[in-house]
């Protein structure tokens, strides 16, 4: 995810060949997230998930994109291949000796570069049995990503899709994070345009028309309570909900084609 900003940019369009290369990077990300899904259970630490992810990324000949990322507010570069965000952590959770417990949720975000092209995807995983309302949060957030993927067509305004995503979250009683949004992706992990999961009339000039050849990381971040977020501590990394309630995050890298969205991080 990237920070929302007031500056609008133009997406670099990709050729079919570029898109196939992004898919190869996306396959590595898919494998990493599948491995994490298998590993997640009560008693596992987020550092163990990260260690296995690092091993798989290296064995695939890819480079972990998050490790070493610098941010203005952060005290140190991001220290891991995965972001592992637990419960009220929305994004940028740092893998640690924290042990996952029954009833937790963990959002795992992974980005890699393979042969010069990037893939980026995230899933929120339930640890054992979770509360029914948290299960609903995960389902609704996943559905927001799916409905965006189903809706994408060239020559559509993104805001039309973002509005549907936001309505889906809010109808369920949840709220959409504003500070962080999706992004274009290609040779760089974060390219233009910014891809919000909500509509704000004040940001109308940021809106863009979907075009064939765009490659986009679409990533709804949804909170159970308030949309407000803050940094957890002085490190300037983990972002948590302001009210301490749980958050969910799902992401796919997709290409816009004449027929609609082509998902590049689903393992195909
Ligand atoms: Mg992303
Ligand atoms: Mg991501």
Image: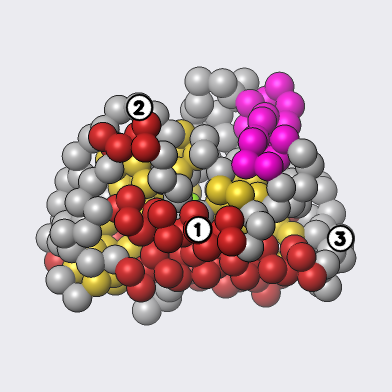
* CB-based contact (under 8 Å), mark 1 and mark 2: no
Question: Which is in the foreground here, disc 3 or disc 2?
Answer: 2
Residue 250 visible? The answer is no
Question: Which is in the foreground here, disc 1 or disc 2?
Answer: 1
Magenta includes 240? yes
- Mark earlier in primary sequence (3, 2): 2
Circle 3 residue:
101
Q: Image quarter for residue 218?
A: bottom left
Which label was assigned to residue 167? Answer: 1
* Coordinates of residue 198 in the picture (x, y in percent): 45, 48
Q: Is residue 41 above or below residue 50?
A: below
* Coordinates of residue 147 in the picture (x, y in percent): 43, 69
Residue at left offset 52%, top offset 63% = 168
Residue at left offset 71%, top offset 47% = 225
* Coordinates of residue 75 in the picture (x, y in percent): 62, 21
Q: Is residue 208 above or below residue 37?
A: above
Label count reads: 3
Residue 176 visible? The answer is yes
Residues shaded magenta: 226-242
Q: Image quarter for residue 28?
A: bottom left
Q: Is residue 245 above or below residue 29?
A: above
Magenta highlight: main SS: loop
Q: Is residue 27 left or right of residue 51?
A: left
Residue at left offset 62%, top offset 41% = 227
- Callout 1: SS: helix
| Quadrant of the rendering where the C terminus is positioned | bottom left
Circle 2 residue:
6
The reply to whether the residue tagged 2 has its Cβ within 8 angstroms of ligand 1 is: no
- Mark earlier in primary sequence (3, 1): 3
């Amino acid at each position: 995810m990237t920070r929302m900003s007031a500056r609008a940019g133009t997406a670099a369009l990709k050729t079919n060949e570029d898109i196939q290369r992004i898919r190869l990077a996306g396959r590595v990300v898919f494998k990493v997230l599948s491995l994490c899904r298998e590993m997640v259970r009560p008693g596992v630490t987020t550092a163990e998930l990260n260690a296995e992810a690092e091993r798989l990324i290296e064995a695939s000949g890819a480079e972990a994109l998050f490790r070493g990322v610098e941010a203005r507010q952060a005290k140190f570069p991001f220290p891991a291949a995965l972001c592992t965000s637990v419960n009220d952590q929305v994004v940028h959770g740092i893998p640690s000796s924290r042990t996952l417990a029954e009833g937790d949720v963990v959002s795992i975000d992974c980005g890699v570069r393979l042969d010069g092209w990037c893939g980026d995807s995230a899933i929120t995983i339930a640890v054992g049995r979770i509360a029914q309302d948290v299960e609903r949060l995960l389902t609704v957030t996943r559905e927001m990503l799916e409905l965006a993927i189903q809706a994408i067509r060239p020559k559509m305004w993104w805001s039309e899709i973002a509005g549907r995503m936001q309505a889906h979250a809010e109808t369920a009683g949840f709220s959409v994070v504003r500070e962080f949004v999706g992004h274009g992706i290609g040779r760089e992990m974060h390219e233009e345009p910014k891809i919000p999961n909500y509509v704000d009339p004040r940001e109308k000039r940021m809106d863009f028309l979907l075009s064939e050849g765009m490659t986009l990381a679409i990533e709804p971040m949804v909170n159970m309570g308030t949309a407000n977020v803050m940094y957890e501590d002085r490190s300037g990394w983990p972002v948590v909900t302001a009210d301490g309630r749980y958050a969910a995050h799902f992401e796919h890298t997709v290409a816009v084609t004449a027929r609609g969205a082509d998902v590049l991080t689903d393992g195909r």
